[in-house]
Image (cartoon, grey):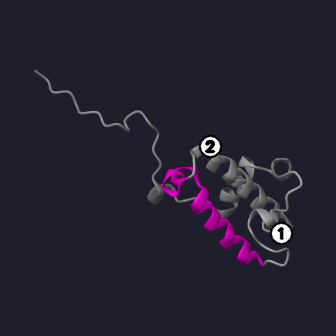
Amino acid sequence: MTKKAKRGFMDGYETYDPDREGYGAAWQWRQNFRARMGADEAREVLKDESPHGVLGLTDAATWNEIKRAYRTLAMKFHPDHATANGITEQDATQQMKRINAAYVLLEARFGKA
């Protein structure tokens, strides 16, 4: 009787080896981020809201302050952390969409896009 090889849960899935393939260039990561939400969609999401206001900043905020506020809010409202922070996943998803939209618009304004 021949023993069958044990199948793992990842068998049949294409895997990625960063040691062999690397992590990709920074411009590729930025391009993928922009593909998820462009400036037009970001303006539509925010409507008349100020991107600075969504992030809890003044209009005089520096780029470093914007990044810090974005990361802080992303940690709080990310849908994966929502229940731990006492927020429903649906509310967290909506809030994250607003936060991402604000960041996209400010990124373009500061020439970081």
Amino acid type, residue under disc 1 in the picture: Gly
Residue 61 image position (x, y, % from top left): 79, 77
Position of residue 35 measured from the top left corner of the image (x, y, whole percent): 73, 48
Front-lying residue, 91 or 68 = 91
On the question of residue 107 being in view, the answer is no
Q: Residue at x 73, y 72 (%)?
A: 66
At x 68%, y 70%, the residue is 69
Using residue 14 as the reference point, say whether residue 36 is left or right of it: right
Dominant secondary structure (helix, strand or loop) of the stretch shown in magenta: helix
Q: Which residue is mark 1?
A: 111
- Residue at the spot x=75%, y=49% of the render? 37
- In the picture, the quarter occupied by the N terminus is top left
Which quadrant of the structure image shows residue 68?
A: bottom right
- State the residue position of label 2: 90
- Inspect the image, locate mark 2, and give the three-letter code of the amino acid beneath it: Gln
Q: Start and end of the magenta stretch?
A: 62-86
